[in-house]
Image: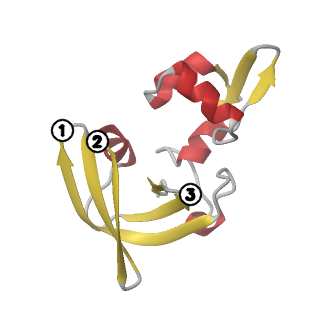
Amino acid sequence: MQTLSAEDVAGLLHLNVKQVQKMAREGRLPAARVGRKWLFQRDLIERTLGAPGVAFAPAALDSISGLSARNRLRGRVTGLTVDGLMAEVRVAIGDQELVSIITRSSAERLGLAVGAEVFAVIKSTEVMIGRSAS
């Protein structure tokens, strides 16, 4: 088990340290506070994000427990437009289409491509896109 500092996680996620600390306080990232420091378990961070190299169970897209959001929808990427720093991801979910705007680096990190099986996590006004490691 590798323990990471907020600075390490910020570098891993390409975020500002203050944003990582805020996400930990809000429960959006699994973390433990020790004194004035936030500590993170690398495997929990990777599982939460669905990072490449994370082994999911066969029903992985339905059984992810590392996210607080419970509104997960399985779908397939039907369109991907990358322009500058952003990417538009179109996901077919049943006979409906969901569109999400995410960062280009997230689309690249997830290895998104037309036809890829993904899941959309809906929480409040945010829609996040994730992908199983298989």
Count of picture labels: 3
Tag in front: 2 or 3: 3
Residue 54 or residue 121, whichever sits in front: 121
Task: Report, in whole angstroms, how far the alpha carbon at label 3 lies from the one at label 1.
Answer: 26 Å
Disc 3 crowd rating (10 Å Cα; few below 14, some 14-19, many 20+) is few
Query: What residue is disc 1 on?
Result: 84
What residue is rendered at 69% in x and 38% in y? 30
Residue at the outermost top position:
36
Residue 22, picture quadrant:
top right
What residue is rendered at 68% in x and 28% in y? 40
Does residue 128 sit above or below 61 in this rendering?
above
**Which label's residue is closer to the chain start, 1 or 2?**
1
Does residue 11 sit above or below 121 in this rendering?
above
Identified by mark 3, the residue type is Ser
Q: Position of residue 93 (x, y in %)?
A: 41, 77
Local secondary structure at mark 1: loop
The answer to whether residue 61 shows anywhere in this view is: yes
**Which label's residue is closer to the chain start, 2 or 3?**
2
Judge from the rendering whether residue 88 lies leftward or rightward of residue 64; answer left or right: left
Q: Position of residue 28 (x, y in %)?
A: 64, 42
Query: What residue is disc 3 on?
Result: 124
Q: Are marks 1 and 2 in contact (CB under 8 Å)?
A: yes
Residue 1 or residue 109, whichever sits in front: 109
Residue at the outermost bottom position:
95
Tag in front: 3 or 1: 3
Q: Are marks 3 and 1 in contact (CB under 8 Å)?
A: no
Identified by mark 2, the residue type is Arg
Query: What residue is disc 2 on?
Result: 104
The answer to whether residue 58 shows anywhere in this view is: no
What residue is rendered at 43% in x and 27% in y? 14
